[in-house]
Each structure stands twice: as structure tokens, then as C-alpha cells.
Image (tube, rainbow, N blue to C red):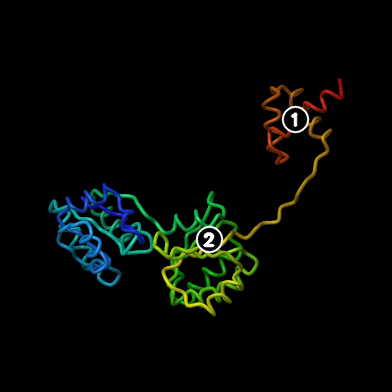
Amino acid sequence: MLYLIATPIGNLEDISIRALDTLRSVDLIAAEDTRHTAKLLMRFDIRKPLVSYHEHNKDTLGEKLIEKLKNGESIAYVTDAGTPGISDPGEDLVKLAIENGIEYTLIPGPCALIMGVVLSGFNTRSFVFEGFLPQDKKKRREVLKRISDEKRTLVFYEAPHNILSTLKELKEHVVDRKICLARELTKKFEELKWGSVDSLIGFYEENNPRGEFVIVIEGNREVEEVIEYEEVEIFNMVNEKIESGLKRNNAIKEVAKETGLSRNDVYAIYERKKGTTL
């Protein structure tokens, strides 16, 4: 069986008991960076064979791992940090497992994407994860153009040596939107910084950026037409629905949906106006 195991993004104490038990039980551990993973295994006294599975060898090693799985071996895959399959070659390993009928699962845990978007304070009901911006210039322009009109919260990953140039590229597309930069998540120097793209560019032109970044950008706020209703209109709308056969509570619910008011407000208006019309 193939186990994808989420590992700490900074603080080693964030690893789960289930993750540790699974790492101790498998026959082989495949890691994006064996040097990084070796430190984690050493910290928890886990001694297992370790192989490197990364972007540059995934095609050849992936097939070999699948063969081992077919022969009954159990394998754990871990990325450098966080949840495998998010902006790393774990995605390709899952596809291979599906294609070959290999049983697999994910041992959940830390994920910088989720932590960043939650800590930003922006809308979490609906958000878009773009990972790292593409290196290809054409694809990069396509992504940047697309985010200009995106109404949902946007989330990116970025390395410290690229953060300033990326902010400058983002400038013309998110000029009026709030941005939260989350860095060193779960670590000693964890930091959240909010501001406009201009203010953040100014800050990092004067301060050396350190640590891996999660960039969270609020969605393009849509200007909606605001319709104001007189209380008598609300009362009449409810009454019309009641007269058509709806029960009072259902009539109030429908009027609330049509006007954008809360059900409590519609109820209060209805009861108030009802008293004046008796």
C-alpha cells in the first residue's frame, strides 16, 4: 500500500502519532529531499530505507516504486514539508497508483496553504490555490491575467528570493486589493504582514525577505447594486405570499432571500407593520 504522509512545515512537534506509526511500519520511505527527511526521521528515531523521489526522476523512479507496491511492499511518500501532492511530484505518484490499481491513502496533517488562508482573515468560503507561479512566461502571463477579475480569495506559494519580483508582477493585477504575506509558518519567527501591494513592495525593498511565503490576496470585490426597500413594501411582499397560500414563516424566508435582508429583519418589519394596519 502507498501512504502519502503529511509532515511538519516547520515545528516538528506538529507531526501526528498516526504519521509516526505509519513511517515506522512501512518497508520504504520515498522523499522529495532525503536530507531534509533524514532529520525528521532521526528526531523520532525512525530507521527505514530512504529513496529520493523528486521532479527530475519521477518518471523513472515512479515506475520502480509501483513495481515494489505490486510486489506487496508498503511505501510512504513525504514531501519536503506539509501535505504531499500539493505543488510537488506526489501528484504524479497518486496518478500512477490509480492507473495501476494500487491501494493508497493520505495521512493528513500540516498544510501551509490552509494555514495561510485561515490566518489571513480573508474569505475562506471560496478560494483559489495557484501554487507557485509558472516559470514559463506565457503561462505566467495567463495566470496573472486571470487573477485580475477573480472574485475568490487567491493563494500562492513563493520562495524568499522571488517574493519581491513576484509582488512587482502582481502589482498591475491586484493594485487595490489587500494582501497577506505569511512566512515561517509554525516556526519561531512566524510572521503575518498585511498591506497593499505597494506597501509590501516598499517593505521588502528595504528588508531582506526570509523564509518560505504564502501569499494570500483578497478577491476582486464586486460592486453590487444595492436595492433599498420601504418597510411597507416588505410587509406587502410577505402578505402577498401568505395570500397565495404560503405559511407565514415560509413567506418571510422567501422575502428575505429576494431582498437580501435577514429573516429576523423581515419578521420584525412584518410584525411591526402588521400592528399598524389592524
Element assignment for label 1: helix
- The furthest residue to the front: 188
- The furthest residue to the right: 277
Would residue 225 be found to the left or right of residue 147 on screen? right
The numbered dot on residue 41 is none
Quick one: 197 or 56, which is closer to the camera?
197
The residue positioned 33% from the left and 59% from the top of the image is 91
Q: How far from the left and from the top, in percent, is residue 19?
A: 26, 51
Quick one: 63 or 159, which is closer to the camera?
159
Q: Amino acid at mark 2?
A: Leu
Q: Amino acid at mark 1?
A: Ala
Snapshot quadrant of residue 38: bottom left
- Label 2 to label 1: alpha-carbon separation: 38 Å
Element assignment for label 2: strand
Q: How far from the left and from the top, in percent, is residue 72?
A: 13, 51
The residue positioned 30% from the left and 49% from the top of the image is 16
Q: How far from the left and from the top, in percent, is residue 208?
A: 47, 77
Question: Are the residues flagged by discs 2 and 1 in contact, CB closer than 8 Å?
Answer: no
Label 2: few (<14), some or many (≥20) within 10 Å? many
- The furthest residue to the left: 71
Please tell me how many numbered marks the rendered image carries.
2
Instruction: Name the residue tied to disc 1.
Output: 268
The residue positioned 63% from the left and 69% from the top of the image is 175
Foreground disc of the pair 2, 1: 1
Instruction: Name the residue tied to disc 2.
Output: 154
The residue positioned 70% from the left and 56% from the top of the image is 223
Q: As displayed, is residue 26 above or below residue 49?
A: above
Q: How far from the left and from the top, in percent, is residue 130?
A: 47, 63
- The furthest residue to the top: 278
Q: Earlier in the sequence, mark 2 or mark 1?
A: 2
